[in-house]
Amino acid sequence: MIKIMDECCDCANGAYPCLGESCEKRHVKHLICDQCNADAETLYDVEGKQLCKSCMEAQFGTVEVSVLTIN
């Protein structure tokens, strides 16, 4: 899922006022895995859920193929 979070760091001071709603830290987009609730760089849409790579691999498994070399 995509969550918009307020990451205000109270950086305003006398010389630099708060920008309010226009501050880039006020509305930060986070990609959250529906299964493990971890922040992810990429989400995969799997059967109506948005999963991170490790949850997707755990659910479906992976296949490794050996490379055969002929001499």
Image (cartoon, helix red, strand yellow):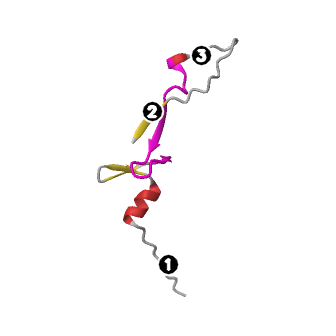
Q: Give the structural element (helix, strand or loop) at label 1.
A: loop
Mark closer to the chain start, 1 or 3: 3
Q: Which residue is mark 3?
A: 18
Q: Bounds of the magenta span?
A: 21-42
Label at residue 43 = none
Q: Give the structural element (helix, strand or loop) at label 2.
A: strand
Mark closer to the chain start, 2 or 3: 2
Against 6, residue 14 (above or below) is above
In the rendered image, the quadrant that contains the C terminus is bottom right
Asked if residue 23 lies in the magenta stretch, the reply is: yes
Which residue corresponds to the image point at 37% horizontal and 64% vertical from the top-left? 60
> How far is disc 1 from disc 2 in space, using C-alphas?
44 Å
Q: Residue furthest top?
A: 14
**Horizontal relation, residue 47 to residue 39: left or right:** left
- Mark 1 crowdedness (10 Å alpha carbons): few <14, some 14-19, many ≥20: few
In front: label 1 or label 2: 2
Q: Residue furthest left?
A: 47
Q: Which residue is mark 1?
A: 67
Which residue corresponds to the image point at 57% horizontal and 16% vertical from the top-left? 19
Q: Give the structural element (helix, strand or loop) at label 3.
A: loop
Tell me which amino acid carries mark 2: Ile
Label at residue 4 = 2
Q: Is there CB contact under 8 Å for labels 1 and 3?
A: no
Tell me which amino acid carries mark 1: Val
Against 34, residue 17 (above or below) is above
Residue nearest the viewer, comparing 23 with 11: 11
- Mark 3 crowdedness (10 Å alpha carbons): few <14, some 14-19, many ≥20: some
